[in-house]
């Protein structure tokens, strides 16, 4: 007799996949920079930087905003460190203000200036947070700009002196250093398109500035090795452009090559490979003979680094186009008549597909994966740290006093997923810093764009962690990449009152 057909057994629910886990010791951080957060621009002997001057020039910055008060980190750093501790951060990346530490850009250091960073580092260390110091995040002492600025070789030499005296004073507390943050912006937005301080618009000055920033980096690394403990970890942070051709045509591929040369390899070449790319010299030969590049400079710049800082926000789509066309002006860096891309006049810039942040920057985490895995392939053995990644959105405090910035949480989750995939694909990524810890002064956009994990009320300077900060805290504390929507076990890790006075 045939047996009756077996009834299917009830299926046990499939166990949910465990959240992706990051390696032990991975640095979970947030970043800021001096001019964007400190304020106190005329206190304790600090002199003007090029950004103070630029902000005072009518029409350069949104509604003529300035960094005079910024978010008052200079006076509120203790509260801010408690905030970081409450978020479970294990590292804080900040920059040292050159005109605070060496007010005239040359000569002896200001003890009062150095003391601020001593106090900040001590507070961080006491909270178990690793300080990561950037020496130059765009605030050149105005006196050095008056003497010619980055287009002049002497500025690189001054930078190395400043690096040495800062390293000597703070090296007992700070073990991780970055020489320059985003030298592409300093050179090409500062001296090329002029949308950043000092607002000059000369393509040759921009190329000279790029070289002297590179040289300053090399000289500073050598100077720092001479004064820092042997285990100090040195790097530079580059905003590398992830480039995509509009079409697969040879002409569009050549547009990618040109922007890669003047956007990426102008720094990667000398810093990591020992020389400028031949095609960059050829592309810019109608502008300059590069006589400012002296024998021995490339060797000086090519110093061994302990890690590379990678800043990524969005990819860039380019095509071949006619010089001066509308597409050629859509460069994503504030427009303006002058180009930040010397030698690439016939390149057009196009919006990448996808959602956009309040900066108008398309959201595409795959670009971060591409960047990290490409760097790992090209520079095996060089550890990478994502030193900036984040998004501006139109955040508002709700009636209940919270900021529900789920778009930022989704952005961070997407990009951390990309970092995790890059790790799985062999990239040696050691940490991630969200940009930014706090809402702050967003350069030519003034206070109009909010990048913070923590909301700042600009009239009271009150800090309120956004929902993204609470999500990021959970990830940082557990080392696990929980999806944004998953309700946290035991309730949301809201910062406590003790953490956030
Ligand atoms: O705010 C800036 C930061 O100073 C340098 N990197 C990009 C950020 C967002 O524009």
Image (cartoon, rainbow, N blue to C red):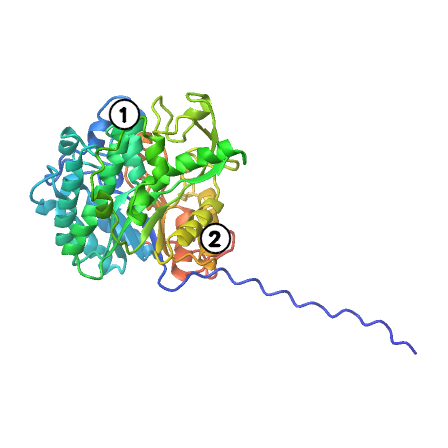
List x then y, in percent, for residue 269: 32, 44
Residue corresponding to mark 1? 202
User: Does 267 sit above or below residue 12?
Assistant: above
* Residue 95 in view: no
Label 2 crowd bin: few (<14), some (14–19), many (20+), radius 10 Å = many
Q: Quadrant of residue 173?
A: bottom left
Q: Residue at x 45, y 33 (%)?
A: 255
Residue 81 is labelled as: none
Q: Secondary structure at mark 2?
A: helix
* Residue 93 in view: yes
Horizontal arrangement in the rendering, residue 22 relative to residue 149 (left or right)? right
List x then y, in percent, for residue 427: 42, 56
Q: Quadrant of ligand 1?
A: top left
Q: Residue at x 13, y 53 (%)?
A: 168
Label 1 crowd bin: few (<14), some (14–19), many (20+), radius 10 Å = some
Q: Residue at x 69, y 67 (%)?
A: 11
Residue 417 is labelled as: 2
Q: Secondary structure at mark 1?
A: loop
List x then y, in percent, for residue 445: 33, 30
User: Does 88 sit above or below residue 40?
Assistant: below
List x then y, in percent, for residue 238: 33, 44
Q: Quadrant of residue 210?
A: top left
Tell how many labels: 2
The alpha-carbon separation of the residues under discs 1 and 2 comes to 40 Å
Q: Which is more toward the observer, 311 or 203?
A: 203
């Amino acid at each position: 007799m045939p047996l009756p057909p077996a009834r299917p057994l009830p299926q046990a629910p499939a166990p949910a996949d465990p959240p992706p886990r990051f390696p032990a010791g991975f640095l979970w951080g947030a970043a800021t920079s001096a001019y964007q957060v400190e304020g106190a621009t005329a206190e304790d002997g600090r002199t003007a930087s090029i950004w103070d001057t630029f902000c005072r020039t009518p029409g350069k910055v949104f509604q003529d905003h300035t960094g005079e008060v910024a978010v008052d980190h200079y006076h509120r750093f203790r509260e801010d460190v408690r905030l970081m501790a409450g978020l479970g951060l294990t590292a804080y990346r900040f920059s040292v203000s050159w005109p605070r530490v060496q007010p005239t850009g040359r000569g002896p250091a200001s003890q009062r200036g150095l003391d601020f960073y001593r106090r900040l580092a001590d507070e961080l260390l006491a909270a178990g947070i690793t300080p990561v110091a950037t020496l130059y995040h765009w605030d050149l002492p105005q006196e050095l700009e008056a003497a010619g600025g980055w287009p002049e070789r002497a500025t690189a030499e001054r930078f190395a002196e400043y690096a040495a005296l800062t390293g000597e004073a703070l090296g007992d507390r700070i073990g991780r250093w970055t020489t320059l943050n985003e030298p592409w912006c300093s050179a090409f937005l500062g001296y090329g398109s002029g949308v950043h301080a000092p607002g000059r618009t000369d393509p040759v000055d921009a190329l000279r500035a790029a070289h002297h920033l590179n040289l300053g980096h090399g000289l500073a690394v050598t100077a720092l090795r001479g004064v820092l403990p042997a285990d100090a970890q040195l790097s530079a942070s580059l905003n590398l452009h992830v480039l995509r051709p509009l079409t697969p045509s040879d002409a569009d591929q050549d547009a990618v090559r040109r922007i890669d040369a003047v956007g990426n390899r102008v720094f990667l070449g000398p810093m990591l490979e020992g020389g400028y790319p031949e095609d960059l010299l050829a592309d810019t030969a109608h502008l300059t003979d590069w006589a400012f590049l002296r024998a021995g400079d490339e060797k000086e710049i090519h110093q061994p680094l302990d890690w590379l800082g990678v800043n990524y926000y969005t990819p860039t789509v380019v095509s071949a186009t006619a010089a001066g066309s509308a597409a050629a002006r859509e460069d994503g860096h504030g427009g303006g008549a002058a180009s930040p891309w010397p030698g690439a006049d016939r390149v057009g810039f196009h919006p990448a597909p996808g959602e956009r942040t309040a900066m108008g920057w398309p959201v595409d985490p795959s670009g971060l994966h591409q960047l990290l895995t490409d760097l790992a392939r090209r520079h095996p053995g060089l550890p990478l740290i994502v030193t900036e990644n984040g998004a501006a959105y139109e955040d508002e405090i709700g009636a209940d006093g919270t900021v529900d910035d789920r778009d930022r949480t989704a952005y961070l989750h997407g990009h951390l997923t990309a970092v995790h995939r890059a790790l799985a694909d062999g990239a040696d990524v050691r940490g991630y810093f969200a940009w930014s810890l706090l809402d702050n002064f967003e350069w030519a956009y003034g206070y109009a764009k909010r990048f913070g994990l923590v909301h700042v009320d600009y009239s009271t300077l009150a800090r309120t962690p956004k929902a993204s900060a609470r999500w990021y805290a959970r990830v940082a504390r557990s080392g696990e990449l929980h999806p944004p929507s998953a309700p946290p076990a035991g309730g949301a890790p809201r910062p406590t009152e003790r953490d956030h006075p």
